Amino acid sequence: MKINTKSRLKANRIAYLVCTFFIFLNLGYKVLQDRETGDVRFELGATEVHVDGAWVEWYSPVYWPFFAIILFLIYRGPVVFKYDTEGDVMNLKVEDKVLFFLGRFANKHYEFPKRKLVDWNIISLPFFRLLTVEIESKTGSIRTRRMPISYLRDSELKKLKMSLNKAKSLNARFKKEGDSLRNKPKDKFS
């Protein structure tokens, strides 16, 4: 089974570009604001307003909504989630080239045999989902891998859960009955 959320990338990029444009437009206005004295001042959010014959600094939240939108998009995490279970290998990949400054949080790739899957869990917060996968390592210890999956639709999330449950139950059955089912030789006469 394959899941790919790359189609949602365009809307997210447009939101980043629009917000960044308006933030820089407003900051540029603030830098070039004082033209009478020839001084170039940089004030974050402050605008001088003439009130009753006196100049008063007034903090205008013109671009704060755009900062809020960008912080919300960063909170939601990477847009592209790829899941592939074709064959005996499970591939989980999360990537977002805009969020490169978040390091490994925004760009992860895990590839492991299906038989190594021990358990999985999805943590749901408002507007944020985190997939936690427990994998058995070569030494027999359990390794935990986490990746954000906030942009999955409900139908895709349901498919992901079904696929992970299938792999987990199959692995539990193999462990209970022994590994002989997995490597069962084919009969030559059938």
Image: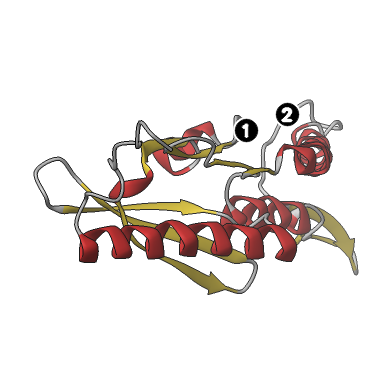
Name the secondary structure under disc 1. Answer: loop
- Local packing at callout 2 (Cα closer than 10 Å; few below 14, some 14-19, many 20+) is few
**Which color mode does the image show?**
secondary structure
Q: Position of residue 101 (x, y in %)?
A: 48, 34
Q: Residue furthest top?
A: 38
In the displayed structure, does residue 46 sit left or right of residue 29?
left
Q: Position of residue 137 (x, y in %)?
A: 19, 45
Relative to 168, is 37 on the left or the right? right
Figure quadrant of residue 105 = top left
Q: Is residue 153 visible?
A: no
Task: Please name the residue shown 61% across and 56% down the image.
Answer: 76
Residue type, mark 2 in image? Asp
When the figure is inspected, residue 177 is found, relative to residue 86, above or below; the finding is below
Q: Which residue is mark 1?
A: 98
Q: Which residue is mark 2?
A: 39
Up/down of 99 relative to 135, above or below: above
